[in-house]
Amino acid sequence: MVQPTPLSSDALHRRGLMFIMSSPSGAGKTTISRMLLEADDAIRLSVSATTRPMRPGEVDGKDYHFVTQPEFDRMVEDEQFLEWAHVFGHSYGTPKAQVKAGLREGCDFLFDIDWQGTQQLYQKLETDVVRVFLLPPSIDELRRRLTGRGTDSTDVIAARMERARAEISHWDGYDYVVVNDDIDQCFDKVREILHAERMKRARQTGLIGFVRELMRP
Ligand code: ADP
Ligand code: 5GP
């Protein structure tokens, strides 16, 4: 009789997770997020809505849903957000619809959101949330990265540097902290976290049936 091929534990059905990456602005979370999305087909970006102006190279609907303040306020009123916050004088929010259905189907979502949004998501969906905080190797390097990125005016960079210390102070509200010194090493560490979190027993909803089958006399 032909034996059935053993099932890899990776192939079992599991519930998706919410992979949150935060950092002080300029520490590299957009860069690491893009690398992760490119390398891993099973995770997709939760595209936030924002009222801030589009930066060169950004695409509406891909990087953010760029909306006006009245549009954003209407979305808040209609309870379309899982969380929302004011950051750097603009409004940012995580739309609800896509994420809730996706998690059930085993899709993972990546969130590039700040500590306020992280707290709100953790309060609502604690068991689905994995919180990763990126730190720059030094404050001087953070300034160099913000300047080198070339997307913000001197005033905006000064404001972001001003806020960096306050943002860093939230490091202890995260499950994992990674220093983004060498980009490739940082990426490898973030990827390892994602892989390990996928294997958590509670997320592998297909395990019960699989184990029952293994134990059948
Ligand atoms: P954030 O999204 O956290 O604001 P970005 O990903 O936009 O930060 O990174 C800020 C700048 O720093 C970008 O120009 C990026 O290319 C650069 N950068 C990111 N990580 C590193 C790193 N490990 N070493 C050197 N430069 C980096
Ligand atoms: P940026 O304007 O540089 O893209 O983002 C500014 C800050 O807003 C970053 O710290 C980013 O993580 C945060 N942010 C982006 N989208 C959201 C969101 O939907 N909710 C919250 N709370 N923060 C967000």
Image (cartoon, grey):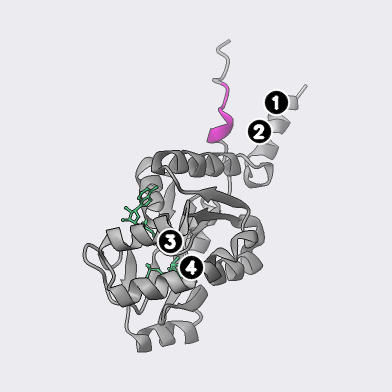
Precedes in sequence: disc 3 or disc 1:
3
Q: Are marks 2 and 1 in contact (CB under 8 Å)?
A: yes
Q: In the image, ligand 2 is in what quadrant?
A: bottom left
* Neighbourhood count class around disc 2 (C-alpha, 10 Å): few under 14, some 14–19, many 20 upward: some
Residue 88 seen: yes
Instruction: Quadrant for the C terminus, please.
Output: top right
Q: Are marks 4 and 2 in contact (CB under 8 Å)?
A: no
* Neighbourhood count class around disc 4 (C-alpha, 10 Å): few under 14, some 14–19, many 20 upward: some
Label 2 belongs to which residue?
A: 210
Precedes in sequence: disc 4 or disc 1:
4
State which mark lies toward you, 4 or 2.
4
**Farthest top residue?**
1
Q: Position of residue 140 (x, y in %)?
A: 42, 58
Q: Position of residue 64 (x, y in %)?
A: 34, 68
Precedes in sequence: disc 4 or disc 2:
4
Three-letter code for the amino acid on which mark 4 is drawn? Ala
Residue at the (48%, 68%) spot, across then down: 164
Provide the residue span drawn in magenta: 6-11
Indicate the secondary structure of the residue bearing disc 2: helix
Indicate the secondary structure of the residue bearing disc 1: helix
Q: Quadrant of residue 170?
A: bottom right
Label 4 belongs to which residue?
A: 164
Label 1 belongs to which residue?
A: 214
Asked if the beta carbon under badge 3 is closer than 8 A to the nearest atom of ligand 2, the reply is: yes
Q: How many circles with numbers are drawn on the protein?
A: 4
